[in-house]
Image (cartoon, coloured by chain):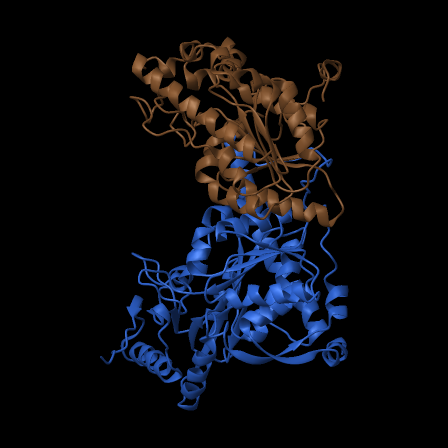
């Protein structure tokens, strides 16, 4: 387990150099920094088209401090497969990480993701999920939640959020987890546990986006925490046959201990149009998701 | 001399074109292969899989879910320092399209075999060059073989060309679907030892390596100024120009190793005293040579200019070969919709106004054109030019009558 002392040690280390092109309150910088802490800054990143292609700034400079290959939108798991095979042949056992958004993961790059997962490529895949195509200006993606406003779902999205982590679990890969940028110690522990395993590892990282969610720049972490505290985002971990609810989410197994969903929704302009019956339906969906995850935890005991 | 010594070390085999390509991949000691099956490319990757299973080739074969992933994977492998290879055809090549450009502009060495095939609809697995020619603007060096031996030689030399520091561009080698891919021909294969000393393992540091713990290199983020992007294209163009020289050097060395000498960018058959030049690329060049022979017997001063490499575009060769010619007739087994034949279109710009010119579209979708038919088309072109003076026909659709 990562300790606060260790986190403090990383406090002044610049894994991402300052002066990036990220929006104020960007969750991706937070998540990527936590990833870099977990791996002590020693890894390769493959980054498909998305916000993280833009954030490091312009060539010949970059804010990222690890080797990075920027690649076409749908290609990152395949490119990472090639890199990992090449470097392993030369005896380099270091982490090859795909850092991708929800569009690249759940939608356009889903075939390459599925292919790399079923081949059990020795890759750590981080899906940084800000729940829409934010880099192109907030269009609905496969992981945009039901009823959320986006520029392509102006009256609220009609479909449910695609559960990518569970889909990856069914690929029978050794490690799948959900995480949140509001729980760095949980996320860092998960990255480190994932690195103890060889093969395809997938972490679905919840990353609230202030401009995309139409909320105050200061609310990034608050929104991520409320997602967990209201039970809307469940932190769980599947590690080689065993699925467990992660510590930050354990209290919220109990419906009564969850904060009211409105607390999470009301700070986000994208849900401003929701009626009370919509919120009720959303709560039912959350209950069903908890039932499913808890049953899976029973099965993968 | 050297050639003769090396020749003795070669083994004669009878292989179909696809298997000959696989043999070249094995001799090049490729590290990572990734591909997706598509007819008529499949024999290449099946044979490579067998070679790996048998331990003849120590490489990773990555069974991906699409051609897009195949190219993305070998691209990643190349960026990670490996020597990498893929192969495809037709729709598979088009499914790769985005990655083709990304791989080329990333300036990593890669080799791909393209077994040429028509594009649907309708579904048609037979030979046409439109697929290979559709990637001509992407930054790949593009070669097209005439026979199985050349498909082998072109594949093997491609690694040397692609990895040359003055080039660092991916190389696509075309071979005609079925006509070469599935047709057995005898060929000479150099020994692993000879190939190994001529083509050492790839230096993973050239041009750069993306590896954990390595130098924090970033490839592909936004340019600070769009002029920087333009400069990269200009550098690519310079490398294409360099490639002309490198291809010549590589074939020169290869000739010493194997005794087989090539053009290198083009070859002109019976051209020294020719007044008329036919132009073609690929397997049917053999049939056109047959037609040339017969026309020569009939007293027609005609030769065949065969394009071996379409990129870099061999304009110096072309202008030199057609210098003084009375007429040029180009055969295209491809079609650029709304324009005409791709070769004819590219070559027509180099034809002086007083020189007769005809572009012939034939063999599309794979229909056979016999030496006799070529003879007829060329003869008519020459006769007409002699009768009427220079003619200019940019596209002539040669469509044979179909029974039933």
Q: Residue at horizontal 50%, vertical 29%?
A: A293
Q: Residue at x 38, y 21 (%)?
A: A284
Relative placement, left or right, of B190 versus B119 is right
Counting every numbered tag in the picture gives: 0
Q: Residue A121, located in which quarter of the rendered image?
A: top right
Q: Quadrant of the C terminus of chain B?
A: bottom left
**A35, A13: nearer the viewer:** A35
Q: Which of the 4 image quarters holds residue B63?
A: bottom right
Q: Is residue B134 left or right of residue B243?
A: left
In the image as oriented, which residue stretches furthest toward the bottom? B297
Q: Position of residue A96 (x, y in %)?
A: 65, 38
B402 relative to B261 in the view: left or right? left
Looking at the figure, which quarter contains the N terminus of chain B?
bottom right
Of the pair A85 and B264, the residue shown nearer to us: A85
Above or below residue B84? Residue B289 is below
Shade of chain B as shown in the rendered figure: blue
Residue B178, x across and y down, in percent: 46, 73
- Image position, residue B235 (x, y; %): 58, 44
In the rendered image, which quarter is residue A186 located in? top right
Q: Is residue B356 visible?
A: no
Q: Is residue A115 above or below residue A191?
A: below
Is residue A159 depicted above or below B116 in this figure? Answer: above
Residue B214, above or below A289: below
**Depth order, front residue of B184/B377:** B184
Residue B113 in percent (x, y) is at 54, 62
Q: Which chain is tinted brown?
A: A
Q: Residue furthest left?
A: B404
- Residue at the image point whose x is 44% and y is 16% from the top: A211
Q: Residue at x 41, y 69 (%)?
A: B127
Look at the image and tell me whether residue B306 can be seen: yes
């Amino acid at each position: 387990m990562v300790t606060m002392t260790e986190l403090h040690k990383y406090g002044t280390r610049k894994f991402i150099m300052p002066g990036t092109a990220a929006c104020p309150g960007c969750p991706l910088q937070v998540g990527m920094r936590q990833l870099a802490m977990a791996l002590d800054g020693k890894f390769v990143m493959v980054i498909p088209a998305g916000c993280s292609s833009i954030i490091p700034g312009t060539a010949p400079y970059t804010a990222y401090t690890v080797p990075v290959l920027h690649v076409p939108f749908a290609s990152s798991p395949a490119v990472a497969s090639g890199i990992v095979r090449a470097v392993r042949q030369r005896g380099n056992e270091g982490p090859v990480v795909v850092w991708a958004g929800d569009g690249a993961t759940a939608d356009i790059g889903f075939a390459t993701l599925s292919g790399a997962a079923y081949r059990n490529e020795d890759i750590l895949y981080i899906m940084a999920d800000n729940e829409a195509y934010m880099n192109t200006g907030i269009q609905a993606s496969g992981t945009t939640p039901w009823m959320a406003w986006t520029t392509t779902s102006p009256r609220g999205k009609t479909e449910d959020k695609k559960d990518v982590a569970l889909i990856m679990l069914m690929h029978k890969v050794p490690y799948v987890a959900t995480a949140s940028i509001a729980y760095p110690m949980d996320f860092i522990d998960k990255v480190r546990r994932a690195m103890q395993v060889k093969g395809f590892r997938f972490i679905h990282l919840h990353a609230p986006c202030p401009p995309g969610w139409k909320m105050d720049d200061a609310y990034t972490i608050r929104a991520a925490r409320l997602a967990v505290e209201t039970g809307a985002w469940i932190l769980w971990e599947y590690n080689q046959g065993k699925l467990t609810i992660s510590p930050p989410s354990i209290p919220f197994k109990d419906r009564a201990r969850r904060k009211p969903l409105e607390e999470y929704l009301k700070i986000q302009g994208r849900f401003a149009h929701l009626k009370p019956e919509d919120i009720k339906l959303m709560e039912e969906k959350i209950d069903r998701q908890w039932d499913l995850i808890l049953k899976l935890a029973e099965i993968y005991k | 001399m050297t050639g003769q010594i090396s020749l003795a070390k070669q083994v004669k085999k009878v292989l179909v074109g696809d298997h000959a390509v696989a043999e070249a991949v094995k001799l090049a000691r490729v590290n990572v292969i990734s591909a997706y099956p598509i007819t008529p490319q499949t024999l290449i990757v099946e044979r490579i899989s067998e070679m790996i299973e048998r331990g003849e080739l120590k490489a990773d074969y990555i069974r991906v879910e699409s051609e897009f992933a195949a190219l993305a994977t070998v691209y990643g492998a190349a960026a990670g320092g490996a020597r990498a290879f893929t192969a495809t055809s037709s729709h598979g090549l088009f499914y790769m399209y985005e990655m083709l450009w990304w791989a080329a502009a990333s300036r990593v060495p890669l080799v791909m075999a393209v077994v040429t095939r028509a594009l649907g609809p309708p579904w048609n697995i037979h030979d046409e060059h439109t697929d290979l020619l559709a990637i001509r603007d992407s930054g790949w060096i593009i070669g097209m073989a005439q026979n199985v031996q050349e498909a082998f030689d072109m594949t093997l030399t491609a690694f040397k060309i692609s990895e040359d520091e003055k080039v660092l561009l991916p190389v696509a080698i075309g071979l005609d679907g079925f006509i070469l891919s599935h047709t057995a021909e005898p060929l000479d294969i150099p020994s692993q030892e000879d190939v190994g000393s001529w083509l050492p393992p790839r230096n993973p540091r050239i041009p750069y390596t993306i590896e954990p713990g390595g130098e924090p290199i970033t490839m592909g983020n936004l340019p600070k100024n769009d002029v920087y992007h333009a400069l990269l294209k200009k550098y690519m163009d310079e490398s294409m120009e360099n490639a002309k020289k490198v291809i010549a050097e590589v074939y020169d060395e290869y000739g010493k190793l194997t005794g087989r000498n090539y053009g290198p960018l083009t070859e002109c058959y019976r051209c020294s005293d020719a007044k008329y030049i036919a132009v073609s690329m690929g397997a049917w060049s053999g049939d056109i040579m047959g037609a040339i022979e017969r026309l020569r017997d009939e007293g027609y001063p005609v030769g065949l200019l065969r394009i071996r490499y379409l990129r870099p575009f061999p304009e110096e060769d072309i202008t030199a070969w057609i210098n003084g010619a009375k007429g040029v007739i180009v055969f295209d087994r491809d079609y650029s919709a709304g324009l005409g034949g791709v070769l004819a279109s590219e070559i027509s710009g180099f034809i002086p106004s007083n020189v007769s010119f005809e572009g012939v579209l034939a063999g599309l979708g794979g229909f056979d054109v016999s030496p006799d038919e070529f003879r007829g088309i060329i003869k008519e072109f020459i006769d007409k030019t002699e009768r009427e003076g220079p003619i200019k026909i940019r596209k002539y659709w040669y469509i044979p009558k179909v029974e039933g």
